[in-house]
Image (cartoon, rainbow, N blue to C red):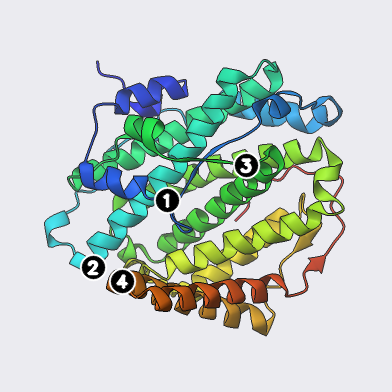
C-alpha cells in the first residue's frame, strides 16, 4: 500500500513522497523573492546547538511529550469529508487568488520544514535536534497536504527544486526566534479565525481544505510555544535593546499580512469575510498570545495604526503598477511612501505589560 505524507513519521519520509509532484507555474511563483513572499532562512546553527533548556524543564518536557505523541498523525489527507471541487466552474479571480494563497501557504510551511530539518541535521544537542525534527515533520505534512489540494487544480510545487534553487536569507538566531514565533502564532490566529467563521457560516466554505484548519493551526500553536520557550531559555532576548527588535518584527509581520491579504479581495469575499475586520481580529488574537513572552504589544487600536496600514497598502499597489509599466521614478516614489508609512507604524508607542512567570499556553480560540 502506498504511503501518504500524513502518515510519515519524519520530515524526510513526507518530502520523499512529494518529490514526483511538479508544476512549472506553481514552482515559479514559489521561487519569487519579494517583501511579501515567504522566504527560506539559514542561521548560526552552532548558536542554536548551544541552547540550554535545563531551567525551563517543567514547561519544556510536557511540550515535547505532546509533540512526540503525534496527535495529528494521519490527519492531513483526504477522506470522506473532502468534497469534490469544480475548479473549472470557479470564478477566475477567486481561482487565481485561492491558488496564490495555497502556493504561498505551501511555500511558508516548507520554508519552516527546511530550516528545522537543517538544524536537526547539523546539531548535536539532543534536546534541540529532537524539537526541530518534530517541527520539521509537521511542516512537511502541511506542505504535502496543500500540494495534494493544488494538484486537483492542475498545479503543484516542486519542493525538492525549491530546496536546491530558492535563495536563502541569513538571520541571526534571535531574529529567527522573533520572526518564526510570530509566523507560527499569527498562522494559528489566521487559521482558527477562518475555521470558527466557517463553523458558523458553512455556506461560505468553498473548498474542503478549510475543514482541516483546526488541527493545522494547533500544530502552528505548538510550534509557537516551542519558540517562546527557546526565548525564555535566554532572558536577555526579551530585554533591553532587543525589545526594539521585537517591536520591529511585530510591525513587519502585521504589516506584511495586512498588505498581502488586501491583494486577495475575491478570496476574502468568497469566505464572507471583511478583510479589515479579519486583519484586526488576527492582530488582536496574536497580540494577546504574544504577551506570554514579549514585554510589549502594538497599539492596534491607535487611530494612526489603521491609517498607516492603508497608506502602506496604497503605496504597495502603486509600486506594483509602476513596476508593470516600467516607470522607474514612480517606483521610487511609491517605495519611499511605503517606507515612510512603515516608519509611521513603528513610531506608534507600544503597550507594555508584565510577562507571566508561566509561559505555556493552550489553544483556546
Between 253 and 323, the residue placed more toward the observer is 323
Q: Is residue 168 above or below residue 57?
A: below
Tag 4 and tag 2, C-beta contact below 8 Å: no
Which label was assigned to residue 93?
Answer: 2
Q: Where's the N terminus, which quadrant?
A: top left
Q: Residues within 10 Å of mark 4 (few under 14, many from 20)?
A: few
Mark earlier in primary sequence (2, 1): 1
Tell me if 26 is positioned left or right of 314 in this view: left
Q: Which residue is mark 4?
A: 326
Tell me if 188 is positioned left or right of 153 in this view: right
Mark earlier in primary sequence (3, 2): 2
Relative image position of residue 55 (x, y in whole percent): 86, 29
Relative image position of residue 327 (x, y in whole percent): 34, 75
Tag 2 and tag 1, C-beta contact below 8 Å: no
Mark earlier in primary sequence (4, 3): 3
Q: Which residue is mark 3?
A: 171
Which residue does the image show at 28% across and 38% down from the upper left? Answer: 148
Residue 154: tell me if it is visible. Answer: yes
Relative image position of residue 181 (x, y in whole percent): 64, 46
Relative image position of residue 185 (x, y in whole percent): 60, 50
Tell me if 289 is positioned left or right of 309 in this view: right
Q: Residues within 10 Å of mark 3 (few under 14, many from 20)?
A: some
> Which picture quadrant has residue 201?
bottom left
Between 235 and 167, the residue placed more toward the observer is 167
Separation of disc 4 and disc 2 at Cα? 24 Å
Q: Which residue is mark 1?
A: 33
Amino acid at each position: 500500500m502506498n504511503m501518504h505524507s500524513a502518515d510519515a513519521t519524519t520530515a524526510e519520509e513526507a518530502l520523499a513522497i512529494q518529490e514526483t509532484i511538479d508544476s512549472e507555474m506553481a514552482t515559479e511563483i514559489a521561487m519569487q523573492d519579494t517583501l511579501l513572499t515567504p522566504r527560506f532562512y539559514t542561521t548560526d546553527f552552532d548558536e542554536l546547538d548551544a541552547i540550554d533548556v535545563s531551567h525551563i524543564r517543567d514547561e519544556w518536557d510536557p511540550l515535547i511529550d505532546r509533540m512526540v505523541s503525534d496527535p495529528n498523525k494521519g490527519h492531513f489527507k483526504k477522506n470522506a469529508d473532502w468534497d469534490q471541487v469544480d475548479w473549472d466552474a470557479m470564478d477566475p479571480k477567486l481561482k487565481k487568488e485561492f491558488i496564490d494563497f495555497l502556493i504561498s501557504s505551501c511555500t511558508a510551511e516548507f520554508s519552516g520544514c527546511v530550516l528545522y530539518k537543517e538544524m536537526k541535521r547539523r546539531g548535536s544537542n539532543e534536546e534541540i535536534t529532537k524539537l526541530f525534527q518534530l517541527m520539521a515533520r509537521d511542516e512537511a505534512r502541511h506542505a504535502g497536504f496543500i500540494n495534494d489540494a493544488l494538484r486537483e487544480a492542475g498545479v503543484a510545487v516542486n519542493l525538492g527544486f525549491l530546496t536546491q534553487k530558492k535563495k536563502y536569507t541569513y538571520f541571526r538566531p534571535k531574529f529567527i526566534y522573533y520572526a518564526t514565533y510570530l509566523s507560527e502564532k499569527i498562522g494559528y490566529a489566521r487559521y482558527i479565525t477562518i475555521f470558527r467563521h466557517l463553523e458558523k457560516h458553512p455556506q461560505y466554505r468553498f473548498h474542503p481544505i478549510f475543514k482541516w484548519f483546526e488541527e493545522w493551526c494547533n500544530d502552528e500553536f505548538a510550534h509557537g510555544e516551542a519558540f517562546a520557550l527557546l526565548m525564555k531559555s535566554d532572558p536577555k532576548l526579551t530585554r533591553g535593546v532587543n525589545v526594539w527588535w521585537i517591536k520591529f518584527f511585530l510591525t513587519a509581520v502585521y504589516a506584511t499580512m495586512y498588505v498581502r491579504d488586501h491583494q486577495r479581495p475575491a478570496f476574502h469575499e468568497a469566505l464572507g469575510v471583511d478583510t479589515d475586520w479579519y486583519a484586526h481580529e488576527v492582530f488582536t488574537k496574536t497580540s494577546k498570545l504574544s504577551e506570554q513572552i514579549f514585554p510589549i504589544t502594538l497599539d492596534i487600536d491607535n487611530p494612526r495604526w489603521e491609517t498607516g496600514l492603508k497608506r502602506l497598502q496604497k503605496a504597495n499597489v502603486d509600486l506594483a503598477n509602476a513596476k508593470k509599466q516600467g516607470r522607474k521614478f514612480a517606483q521610487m516614489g511609491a517605495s519611499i511612501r511605503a517606507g515612510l508609512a512603515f516608519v509611521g507604524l513603528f513610531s506608534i508607542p507600544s503597550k507594555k505589560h508584565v510577562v507571566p512567570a508561566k509561559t505555556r499556553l493552550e489553544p483556546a480560540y
